[in-house]
Image (cartoon, helix red, strand yellow):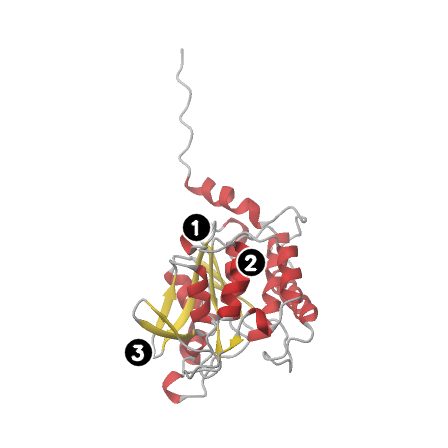
């Protein structure tokens, strides 16, 4: 083990899952390898595809089951064509239906066993909006709303679009939620095509910090808009996590997110007072 912080024993460990469309399947492989090594983030923040996978993780989905869901997913599970005029050709009804089917209606962020936030962008103010309360479906709908493709989401007085416009890798937002060390999973670069939204320098300042551990799956020339080989993307996530964290020994399949609430609670539970003497 190197001299860096031991992530297995950091009670305020966060993970920032970056955006990247279909490339988000790689996040599942990363999370699986973390769990095998007893590394359980207690704060999860995602942008766009990272928000979708992060919400499932925070909700306690079994990671093998999550892999099966992801590799069978299609674009229709997230967006459906809208035939009424608007700022986009898709709405997020497909995503809302998928959430209702897998997790039940009215799933609230506050009820998730792991603290969770989704990053979106205010289209008017051009500022980051961190959604860490309220319905999961609303937060995810806002975070995945790629401008021009999905219609913006109106929420809490904001007109919201994809969080990747400002923070495609939400390291800063994860620290804002209280993390002391953050694992960042980078799938795609920052969106610097528009001068008014150039943020890569600020995000890079977080990537090189000592309290950030970066994992970068080797995506190569794969497109975020093509979902042809999702199992291979999951494996690329595993490979990248092994490369970054291979010096942590595997603990076996039983080291899963189900253990997390008890592990975190143990850090804050008051010590048992000594028994009185006779």
In the rendering, which numbered label is found on residue 145? none
Residue at x 39%, y 83% (from the top left corner): 197
Q: Is residue 180 above or below residue 173?
A: above
Nearer the observer: mark 1 or 3; the answer is 1
Nearer-N-terminus badge (1/3) = 1
As helix, strand or loop, the secondary structure at mark 3 comes to loop
Marks 1 and 3, how far apart in space? 30 Å
Q: Is residue 215 above or below residue 151?
A: above
Residue linked to disc 3? 125
Residue linked to disc 1? 111
x and y percent of residue 273 in the render?
A: 40, 26
Residue linked to disc 2? 101
User: Decide: marks 1, 2 in contact (CB < 8 A)?
Assistant: no
x and y percent of residue 264 in the render?
A: 47, 45
Q: Where the N terminus falls, by quadrant?
A: bottom right
x and y percent of residue 45 in the render?
A: 46, 63
Q: Is residue 55 above or below residue 120?
A: above
Using a 10 Å C-alpha cutoff, classify the residue at mark 2 as few (fewer than 14 neighbours), some (14 to 19) or many (20 or more): few
Q: Residue furthest front?
A: 83
x and y percent of residue 204 in the render?
A: 45, 75
Give 262 or 159, whichever is nearer the viewer. Answer: 159
Nearer-N-terminus badge (1/2) = 2
Q: Where the C terminus falls, by quadrant?
A: top left
Marks 1 and 2, how far apart in space? 17 Å
Q: Report whether residue 198 is seen.
A: yes
């Amino acid at each position: 083990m190197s001299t860096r912080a031991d992530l297995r024993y950091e009670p305020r460990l966060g993970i920032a899952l970056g955006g990247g469309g279909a490339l988000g399947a790689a996040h599942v492989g990363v999370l699986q390898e973390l769990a095998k090594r007893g590394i359980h983030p207690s704060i999860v923040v995602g942008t766009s595809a990272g928000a979708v996978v992060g919400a499932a993780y925070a909700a306690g989905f079994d990671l093998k089951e999550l892999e099966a869901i992801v590799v069978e997913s299609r674009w229709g599970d997230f967006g459906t064509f809208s035939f009424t005029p608007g700022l986009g050709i898709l709405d997020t009804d497909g995503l809302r239906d998928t959430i209702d089917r897998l997790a039940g209606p009215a799933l609230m962020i506050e009820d998730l066993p792991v603290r969770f936030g989704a990053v979106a962008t205010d289209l008017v103010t051009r500022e980051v909006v961190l959604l860490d309360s309220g319905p999961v479906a609303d937060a995810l709908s806002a975070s995945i709303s790629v401008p021009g493709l999905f219609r913006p989401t109106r929420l809490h007085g904001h007109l919201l679009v994809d969080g990747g416009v400002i923070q495609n890798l939400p390291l800063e937002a994860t620290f804002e939620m209280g993390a002391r060390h953050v694992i960042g999973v980078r799938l795609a670069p920052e969106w610097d095509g528009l001068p008014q939204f150039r943020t890569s320098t600020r995000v890079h300042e977080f990537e090189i910090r000592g309290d950030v551990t970066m994992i970068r799956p080797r995506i190569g020339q794969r497109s975020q808009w093509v979902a042809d080989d999702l199992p291979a993307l999951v494996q690329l996530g595993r490979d990248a996590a092994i490369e970054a964290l291979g010096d942590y020994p595997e603990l076996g399949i039983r080291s899963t997110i189900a253990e997390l609430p008890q592990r975190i609670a143990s850090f804050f539970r008051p010590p048992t007072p000594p028994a009185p003497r006779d």
